Structure formats: structure tokens, C-alpha cells
Image: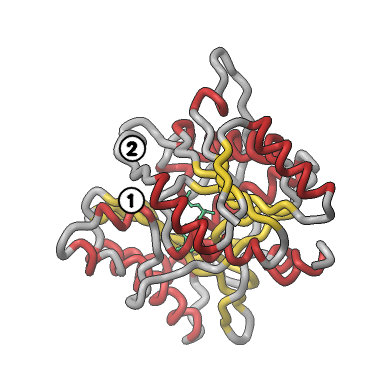
Amino acid sequence: MPTRLLTTVEEARDLSRSWRASGRNVVLVPTMGDLHEGHLSLVRAGLDVGDVVVSIFVNPMQFAPGEDFESYPRRLEADRARLEEVGAAAIFAPSVEEIYPPGETTRVEVRQLSAPLCGQHREGHFLGVTTVCTKLFVGCEPDVAIFGQKDAQQCLVLWRLVRDLRLPVDLVFSPTIREKDGLAMSSRNRYLEGEQRDRAVTLARALGRGRQLLESGERDVATIEREMRSLLAAGADRPDYVELRRVPDLERLDLAEGRVLLAAAAYVGRARLIDNLCLEVGEAVREVPLLDAHTLQAVRARHAV
Ligand code: AMP
């Protein structure tokens, strides 16, 4: 089946309602396009649950002043070919005016979880994310929406949003897809030039160092962060942060215990890169999903697939 291209909220909602009327789950995969294997892994996960619509929208509201909104890669034709190959049923690629009608003033804000980490470094970013995702959820009426755990703070902010508004959408947080050397795939990896590509793996290495320290019994968060920071500072051009925080509220801890997120953000050249590791810290240390109730398996079970 060819992948249908939809551009209005009305078309997206009509299609969603027709799928549901014929007994199929509607799965939304929100993206900004320039699709890579990370995005396609979300689509494949979605196909396990229902019919998939991929939204492609470079959302101006989630870019802070001076960021790369203008230069962000836009490749709708290539994206469409890849989605057709993978088997997505539809693309929803609205214009900016369709999502932000002239004169609009409505915002959806999640407090607290939006404040630390990327919230401190990207002014208004999560307000843009939560506003656009609310519009996509209300517009497309998905049963399930899938996001990458690569953007772990985004996942937690959206988890809070869905709970607070009691939105009838079930969220899946899907594992991070990496290049062979460990670099998390990202559309912004395109910006890396020459030797910058080798240095980009520093984020994953710094997080790996944090994990090693935890595995060797270190629990003091200040010590772990200091070590991760010095590694990141050695490889990145401008580190934004590298921190250990509690999941799911992203509060600070003095001693690492329970479910924690190691999260890093840094510029390498003009690419702002982020990465994270979610770990359960007890007697042993193991990598775990961000939230057990939001793995693909858990959501599949709830949707009787
Ligand atoms: P973006 O187009 O960058 O806004 O990303 C769209 C969705 O793809 C988000 O839910 C991201 O978390 C997810 N995503 C981006 N990169 C990866 C990756 N390397 N692995 C898994 N998911 C990803």
C-alpha cells in the first residue's frame, strides 16, 4: 500500500477515525523528518501495535532563539520513500499555519519536569514540545504514540502531560538506536564535519564512564558527575550538562539509588547532541527502560494485539 500524504488536521482525524472504526489501533510517531534508522525503529515498533501515521513537522516553537530552525534538514520526498519501504500507512505533514492558525495564543505547559537539563539550556523548548504534541494528539486521535528514549526528558515531560490531562493516548518509549561506535543516531549528526564525527562519541563515552563507576560501587553523585564532566569537556566543544537524576521526577540525588538517568548534552561543532542511559541502581547496576509501563511489550498487552 502506498503511504498516504496528509496535510490537514481534518484529513488526519478522518483517517484515524476510519482505522479505528474498522477495529485497528491508530499509532502516531511524531518526528521532525530527515528520517534515520532511529525514527524507522519507532515506525517498526508501531507496526507491531496498529496502523502507523508518522507526523513530519519542524516545529518552530521548540527551537530556542539562535538555534537551527531555519537550517534544520527538510527532506520530505526521501522520508516518504523510506516510510513506504517500512510500511507506514500515512504521513501527516502539516504547514506551520495548520498547526498554529493565525492569531493563535494557546500553550500547554508541563512544569517542573521541563525545568532542568535541556530546559535550562533551551529556552521554551519543552513548551514547544508539549504544545505541539497536544495538538498532534488532539488532531490525530491516536491510541498509541511512540517516542524515542534518546530524548528521555521529552518522554518524561510527555508522560506527565498525558497523565495530567488524562489524554486517551498510550505512550511507548522505544530504545535508542546507535551507530557502531555508540553515537546515538540523530538528524543533527549531519552537521558533524571531519574529525567532529569521532569526537561526537564522547557523550556516550562519558555516560559509559558514569555507568562503570556505578558498577564498581561508587554511589556519590558529585563524584560520578565530576568524572563524566571531565571526559565530556575533553571531547566536546561546549558541554551543556552531564548529570545523574532520579527517574521519573528528574530530581537531584546525593547518592545514586533506584532508577536513575545519566544524561548529557554538548555541542560538537555546530551540532547540539544529547544522549542518556537509564539504569537501575541496587546491589547490581543494570540498564532498564525509562518506565516499565511504557515499553512496547507493556503497551501491546494493554491494546490486545
Ligand atoms: P526528531 O525528529 O529528532 O524530533 O525525533 C523524532 C522521534 O524519534 C523522537 O521521539 C526521538 O526521540 C526519536 N529518535 C530520534 N533519534 C533516535 C534514536 N537514535 N533512536 C531512537 N529514537 C530516536
Q: Secondary structure at mark 1?
A: strand
Which residue occupies 44% across, 55% down?
81
Q: Is residue 295 among what the camera can see?
A: yes
Dot 1 surroundings within 10 Å: few (below 14), some, or many (20 or more)? many
Q: Which residue is mark 2?
A: 67
Seen at 56% across and 46% down, the residue is 91
* Residue at the image position 40 percent from the left and 57 percent from the top: 274
Q: Which residue is mark 1?
A: 272
Which quadrant of the rendered structure holds the C terminus?
A: bottom right
Q: Residue at x 72, y 63 (%)?
A: 49
Q: Is residue 20 left or right of residue 144?
A: right
Along the line of sight, which residue is nearer the eye, 270 or 259? 270
Residue 250 in sight from this viewpoint: no
86 or 281: nearer the viewer: 86
Q: Amino acid at mark 2?
A: Glu
Q: Going from the N terminus, do you reach mark 2 or mark 1 first?
A: 2
215 left or right of 298?
Answer: left
Please state which amino acid type lies under the numbered disc 1. Answer: Arg
Total count of labels: 2
Compared with 8, 251 (above or below) is: below
Q: Is residue 212 above or below residue 207?
A: below
